[in-house]
C-alpha cells in the first residue's frame, strides 16, 4: 500500500455521507466504529486476522491528491467548501487492533476506530477490503496446513488469483497462515518470505525427450532438483527417468541438496505409493514426493487417510481464492458517539436477524488461558473500563447459548487483552513485525487452541461471552429502542 494514492478506494456513499456530516456541522463529532465478522469462514472453529500492516500503510498515506480533487469536482456532486475541506484531509484519530496472526472469533472487534465521524466514515470501505481479504486467505491457509499434518505446504496460486493485489497480498496472508513459502516472486521481495518452485510441463516438452529435460534441469539446479514426472507417463516414464537422473547425480557427487519428484495429475494416493516403492528400491527413500493438482484441505486430509506418501504439498487455486468460501464477511459498525459534553454515548443497531444486532459501546476483548496448558478457555467482550481480577473466580457463558457455561476458579487461569494501540492522535505508535515473525506468532496462537477447535469439520467452538455490564447495556438499549419504535 506504500506510495499508492488510495483515498478514492471507497464507496461513493462514504463521500456523500462525509459531505452530509460536513454540511450539518457535525463532522468533528467523535465516534467509535468496530470492525468485526459474524461467522467463521469455511465452517472453521476460528479465524486468523491479517492485513493490519496494509491497513496501517493505507491510513498513514491517506490524503486526496490534486487528481483526486479534480475528479471529485467533475462529478458535480460535491460542494466547493467540502472539496476545499478534502484538500487538507488527514487521519487524526485513534485505532486499536488485534495483531496479525491472532486467532479470533465472531463478533470480536478486530479493529476499533475512534475519530471524528468524517474521518472514521471514510476508512470503512478500504479497511474492510484489506482486513477481509487477508484474514480470509490466512484462515484458509491455516486449514490447509492443519490438514497436511506437519508436511510443508507451498502457496502457488498467483495465476488463478483475482488480480495482482489479491495474488500478492493473498500469498502474504497464506504465509501468515502457515505456508512454508510462495511461488510469487513479488511477494518474496516485498515481504521477505521464502519463494519456491520447480519447473512446468513445458520444460519437459521443450526437449527432445523427458530424460534430457530432467538431466538439464538437474545440471542447472542440483541443490533443488524436484522433477515433474507426469508429462507423459508417471510410472512407466517419469519416475524411472527421475531415478536415472538421481543415480547420475549421486555418482557425480551432486546429490547433496533437496531432490525428489512432483505429481500433478492422476490418483495421487496410488501414484505416490507406487513412486515411493520405486524410489526406495533404487536407494532414494529420502526423496521428496510433492503433489499439486487442485488440492485443498479436504483432499489433502483424504489423501492422508489413504496413506499417500506425499510429504510436500503445492496448493494454488483453492487456497488463493478460498474456493469454498469466497468472502470473509467482516462489517464496520458504529458503536458509540460523543455528545456535547464529550461523553461517549453507546449506540446499537437492531435487526430482525439476531446475529446482526450490534454490541454497543467502546469495547475491549479479554482472552482467558488455562494456566497448566496455556490453552484458550474462552474470550470475553467487555466495556472499555472493565478489568479482570485473576484472583477471583469467574463464570463464562457462550453469548449465543447462555445455558452453556464454564467456571474458571481463581488461580487456574490468566488473562490477556487482545486490542493494542496502533494510532494515537493520528500518530502511528506500532511497528508491524516481519511476515515470517507473524507466521511464528500465528503458529503459537494455533497451538493455544485445543485439538477439538482445529478439526476441519464440526469443530468445537470457543465460548465468546459478553461481560455482565455489556449485556446489561445491550439489553437496556434494545428495550429503549423497542419502546421508541
Image: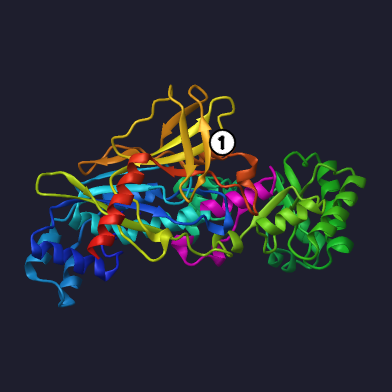
Q: Nearer the viewer, residue 96 or 295?
A: 96
- Position of 439 with respect to 280 (left or right) is left
- Position of 156 with respect to 109 (left or right) is right
Q: Residue furthest front?
A: 483
Residue 460: percent from left, percent from top: 60, 47
Q: Nearer the viewer, residue 242 or 307?
A: 307
Q: Is residue 164 magenta?
A: yes
Residue 269: percent from left, percent from top: 81, 57
Q: Nearer the viewer, residue 200 or 32?
A: 32
Q: Is residue 289 magenta?
A: no
Residue 34: percent from left, percent from top: 33, 51
Magenta span: 138-166
**Does residue 102 appear in the picture of this structure?**
no
Residue wearing tag 1? 448
Residue drawn at (58%, 39%) of the image: 449
- How crowded pointer 1 is (Cα within 10 Å; few <14, some 14-19, many 20+) is rated as some
- Position of 16 with respect to 361 (left or right) is left
What is the secondary structure assignment of the residue under circle 1? loop
Q: Nearer the viewer, residue 211 or 351?
A: 351
- Position of 71 with respect to 458 (left or right) is left
Residue drawn at (20%, 61%) of the image: 64
Q: Residue furthest right?
A: 281
413 to 291, vertically: above or below: above
100 to 393, vertically: above or below: below
Residue 229: percent from left, percent from top: 79, 60
Amino acid at each position: 500500500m506504500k506510495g499508492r494514492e488510495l483515498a478514492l478506494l471507497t464507496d461513493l456513499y462514504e463521500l456523500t455521507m462525509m459531505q452530509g456530516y460536513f454540511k450539518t456541522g457535525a463532522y468533528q463529532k467523535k465516534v467509535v466504529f468496530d470492525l468485526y465478522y459474524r461467522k467463521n469462514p469455511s465452517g472453521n472453529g476460528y479465524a486468523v486476522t491479517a492485513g493490519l500492516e496494509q491497513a496501517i500503510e493505507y491510513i498513514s498515506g491517506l490524503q486526496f491528491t490534486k487528481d483526486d480533487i479534480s475528479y471529485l469536482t467533475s462529478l458535480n456532486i460535491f460542494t466547493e467548501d467540502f472539496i476545499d475541506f478534502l484538500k487538507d484531509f488527514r487521519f487524526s484519530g485513534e485505532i486499536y487492533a488485534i495483531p496479525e496472526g491472532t486467532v479470533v472469533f465472531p463478533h470480536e472487534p478486530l479493529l476499533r476506530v475512534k475519530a471524528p465521524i468524517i474521518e472514521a466514515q471514510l476508512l470503512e470501505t478500504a479497511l474492510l477490503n484489506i482486513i477481509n481479504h487477508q484474514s480470509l486467505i490466512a484462515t484458509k491457509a491455516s486449514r490447509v496446513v492443519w490438514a497436511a499434518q506437519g508436511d510443508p505446504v507451498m502457496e502457488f496460486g498467483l495465476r488463478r488469483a483475482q488480480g495482482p493485489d489479491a495474488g500478492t497480498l493473498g500469498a502474504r496472508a497464506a504465509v501468515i497462515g502457515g505456508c512454508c513459502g510462495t511461488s510469487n516472486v513479488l511477494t518474496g521481495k516485498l515481504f521477505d518470505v521464502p519463494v519456491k518452485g520447480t519447473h512446468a510441463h513445458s520444460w519437459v516438452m521443450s526437449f527432445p525427450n523427458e530424460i534430457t529435460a530432467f538431466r538439464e534441469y538437474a545440471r542447472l539446479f542440483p541443490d533443488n532438483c524436484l522433477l515433474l514426472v507426469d508429462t507423459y507417463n508417471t510410472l512407466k516414464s517419469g519416475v524411472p527417468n527421475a531415478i536415472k537422473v538421481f543415480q547420475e547425480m549421486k555418482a557425480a557427487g551432486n546429490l547433496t541438496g533437496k531432490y525428489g519428484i512432483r505429481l500433478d495429475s492422476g490418483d495421487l494416493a496410488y501414484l505416490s505409493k507406487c513412486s515411493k516403492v520405486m524410489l526406495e528400491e533404487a536407494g532414494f527413500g529420502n526423496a521428496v514426493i510433492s503433489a499439486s493438482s487442485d488440492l485443498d484441505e479436504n483432499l489433502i486430509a483424504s489423501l492422508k487417510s489413504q496413506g499417500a506418501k506425499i510429504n510436500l504439498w503445492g496448493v494454488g487455486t483453492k487456497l488463493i481464492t478460498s474456493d469454498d468460501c469466497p468472502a470473509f464477511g467482516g462489517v464496520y459498525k458504529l458503536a458509540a458517539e460523543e455528545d456535547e459534553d464529550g461523553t461517549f454515548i453507546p449506540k446499537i443497531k437492531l435487526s430482525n436477524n439476531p446475529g446482526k444486532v450490534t454490541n454497543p459501546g467502546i469495547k475491549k476483548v479479554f482472552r482467558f488461558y488455562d494456566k497448566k496448558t496455556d490453552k484458550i478457555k474462552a474470550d470475553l467482550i467487555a466495556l472499555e473500563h472493565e478489568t479482570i481480577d485473576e484472583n477471583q473466580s469467574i463464570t463464562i457463558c457462550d453469548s449465543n447459548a447462555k445455558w452453556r457455561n464454564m467456571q474458571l476458579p481463581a488461580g487456574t487461569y490468566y488473562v490477556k487483552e487482545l486490542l493494542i494501540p496502533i494510532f494515537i492522535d493520528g500518530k502511528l505508535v506500532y511497528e508491524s513485525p516481519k511476515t515470517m515473525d507473524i507466521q511464528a506468532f500465528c503458529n503459537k496462537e494455533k497451538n493455544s487452541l485445543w485439538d477439538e477447535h482445529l478439526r476441519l469439520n464440526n469443530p468445537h467452538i470457543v465460548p465468546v461471552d459478553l461481560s455482565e455490564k455489556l449485556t446489561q447495556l445491550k439489553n437496556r438499549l434494545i428495550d429503549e429502542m423497542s419502546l421508541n419504535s
